[in-house]
Image (cartoon, rainbow, N blue to C red):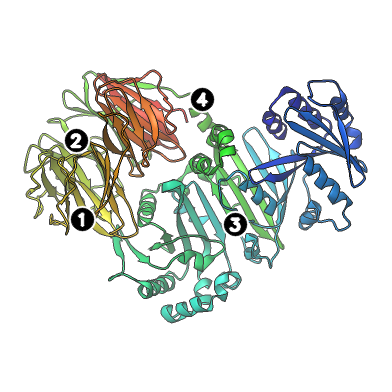
Amino acid sequence: MLQKTIITASDNGETKQLWETIIKSADKLVVSLHVTKKDDFDFVYYLPVNKAKGVEAFLHSPGEKQSKISQRELNGIQINEVRFGDRVFSWTTFEDIWAASFTPFLIEDVIRTYKSDKRRTFGTTLSGVQQFPKVKNDAGNLYVNLKGISQWFVTFLQEGQISSSGQASLLDVKSTANNIILNGFSSASEDNTDELLSFFYNQSPVPFTLKQYASARALAVTSFGITDGKQLFNKLPISRNSAFLDSIRMLGDVNPEELYAGIGKELAVCYFEGRENKLSKVLMLSVSNARQWLHTIDRLAQATEKEDSLYFEQYSNHEIKEIDLVNLPEKLFKPLIHGFERTYYCQLDNTILLAERVEDLRRFLDDVEREDVWGKSVEFNQYLESTLLESNLSIYINPSRAYGYLQKQLNPKWGNVLSKPLRGELNSLSFAAIQFSSLNNSFYTNVSFILNDQKIAVQQQPSRIQANLDHRITIGPFVVVNHVTKRNEIVVQDSTYGLHYFSLDGKRLWRRNLPGKIIDRVHQVDYLSNNKLQLFFMADGKLEIIDRLGNAVSPFPVVVPNQAYDFVRVVDYDNSKRYRYLLTEKSGKLWLLDKEGKNLDGWRPRIIDGALIEAAQHHRIRGKDFILAIRKDGVVHLFNRRGEDIKGFPLNLESKPAGSYFLESGNTVATTNFVVVTKDGVKIKFNVEGKIVSREPLVKTAVDDVFALVPEKSGKSFVIVRNNSKQFELLNEQGQRILTNDFSGKNSIDVQYYDFGSGRIYYVLADVTQDLVYIYDGAGQLLTPVPVEAESITMFLDGNSVYYAASFEYQLAIQPMQN
């Protein structure tokens, strides 16, 4: 692998030949890695002098080198140099060692180190691990300066730093066709708190039991194994923060040392992709004294509350609260934990969850409830068999999910070089882990990368599946989840009102006759609150709920009070499954029905006297529920649960919005904004208090430009359409061009925007006149040079693969995308 990597990195034929000659000159080649610039690094190659004769012969042979060999001297030792293209290759000999590099000053450093009376060498750094046993006849040994490797990682990044885990590691390399495993030992100074491993001396390794809660959406999880909470407390900086400890003693009525003694062996952080190229985090703290921890945090929240009342939200069976104390998790566990400008928290069994954003905490709880977690993943549990089952510090990485974040963190130099290769390599891996386990004043170390054959197969052989119906498809496709298999399935309706249910392999599982055409869309509900999902929709003036086998759920169908609805939405205020059904007419009439389909007071109907741009929608903002309806003339209505106007509404934007809108979450009600774009090109933000926050004119490129806003399907962000008689463009939130489409002329185009994470971003442009669809990636590159024939199309994520499902006339097509 080393040979392949080095040779591939070369940029001309003669340089490749030189590297091949060096690598083949000795059975055991020694290569050292050095940071040379803020954003660059290079190698030094070492051979016994008697093994370097072939290299010397190559260097002295006539070739395409642009210069002859020259010599210079440093500290009495001769340095030889020759130029290959724009690179200078330097080499020297001393005692019985031949050393060479494409960075001349690295050879100078080698000579200075050799000549120094007081050597601070790499061997000195490794002294703590040199005595450990090595495996013979393996793929090689890797000697690691852990601080140096952290500095090396930083050369690839735009900014930031990476904490050092310890002093040094000595690892044996085991390589097969499907995996690379590095095993060995690492050293750390027990008293050097700049090294994370120093906190785990005399802590016994523990299993990763918090995997039962770790969301499958996580791109990485850092897990800390703790068996002596008191000892950990006395090593953490908080033990020396007298003022903060006094607050804990006074408010929590507890000794902080006893509080930490209740840590139930694990502390872990799940990392997710967030907005604006940032990571969002959820901290999982396993404790045996949850009541004490919650009481202490509650009292701290009361003491630091700056608003009129404490934030509290009932979400499903959980109480979510907020503590207005900046960086609380960091204060409690630094340097193991960093960040968390704000902290929302709740209890999940004997685990306390803390997150920076309440939306992140809600979604995390949803994942746990759906069992969409690593602990239930067959793939992850199979991978764990190749790792240390007990550890003190583990970093688990889902490489394919991590790609999107890593790609955005690369500096310009490495971003251009590594983006495509990095995606291919990471997508081919199932999981990766770096682990340290305390053992006899050192740390047994395991690094493992496992190849996933299934991912490679999907990448190499995307196959199109097609199903043919007897009657034309008129509604759908809709993507639904099978609660048994956790896989996605497809629902369509044909012209005879037949409802068809397909698996992803194109097999029709059942067909059911309906009394009429489905209105708007198909939803999924857990009507019986038993973690089993059913289909919910409206047809022929009736609400219908059908289970996954096609059977009606009692008491449905239920007749609704009116027959002219255009939109149907399911509202679950607090994830309690006490559903409400929000029915909307485009003319501006709103009904809200209870779970059984009965009309609720205040919504019989709620009339807003004007056509809407889209369906009325429910939003929960800092524990309060709002229903938003935006009229085409720019008048905005915002209601509470009872259908009453929120203070400040109706709000007249005095411009006509186009497309949809976007909810921009903030830390308070006042800083949470709705964003719309007007047809004539003004981006307007208004808040829940009925105040217009900003009006920003967008750049026009033609006098007939018209604009519209398109939100990402899961609400992550939005794009802006700029369209005129000659050209169709998509812009990002800042107004920068993403792509241009010249194929559709003046035809009407429907736009969909998907961000599945890990850099898997797609823009779907559907020419509704010609029934042709163009799919672009996140960089604005066209992925479908031959457009897809489709009257309706949707994209979805199943496992780790992205698909589209499209209907055209009598055909349903299901196509995996190339990752």
Which numbered disc, 2 or 1, marks the residue that appears first in the sequence? Answer: 2
Q: How would you rate the neighbour count of disc 1 (Cα within 10 Å): few for under 14, some for 14-19, many for 20 or more? A: some
Asked if the residue at tag 4 contacts the one at tag 3, i.e. Cβ–Cβ closer than 8 Å, the answer is no
Q: Residue drawn 41% across and 25% down?
A: 782
Asked if the residue at tag 4 contacts the one at tag 2, i.e. Cβ–Cβ closer than 8 Å, the answer is no
Q: Amino acid at mark 2?
A: Asp
Element type where label 1 sits in the image: loop
Q: Between marks 2 and 3, how big is the CA–CA gap?
A: 50 Å
Residue 586, x across and y down, in percent:
13, 38
Q: Between marks 3 and 4, how big is the CA–CA gap?
A: 36 Å
Up/down of 276 relative to 811, above or below: below
Image mark count: 4
Question: Which label was assigned to residue 520?
Answer: 2
Element type where label 3 sits in the image: strand
Which numbered disc, 2 or 3, marks the residue that appears first in the sequence? Answer: 3
* Circle 3 or circle 1, nearest the eye: 1
Q: Between marks 2 and 4, how big is the CA–CA gap?
A: 37 Å
Q: Between marks 3 and 1, how big is the CA–CA gap?
A: 49 Å
Q: Amino acid at mark 4?
A: Gln
Which numbered disc, 3 or 4, marks the residue that appears first in the sequence? Answer: 3
Element type where label 4 sits in the image: helix
Q: Quick check: 199 left or right of 248?
A: right
Q: Amino acid at mark 1?
A: Gly
* Circle 1 or circle 4, nearest the eye: 1
Up/down of 291 relative to 22, above or below: below
Residue 481, x across and y down, in percent:
33, 39
Question: Which label was assigned to residue 393?
Answer: 3
Q: Nearer the viewer, residue 762 or 200?
A: 762
Q: How would you rate the neighbour count of disc 2 (Cα within 10 Å): few for under 14, some for 14-19, many for 20 or more? A: some
**Residue identified by numbered label 4:** 460
Q: How would you rate the neighbour count of disc 3 (Cα within 10 Å): few for under 14, some for 14-19, many for 20 or more? A: many
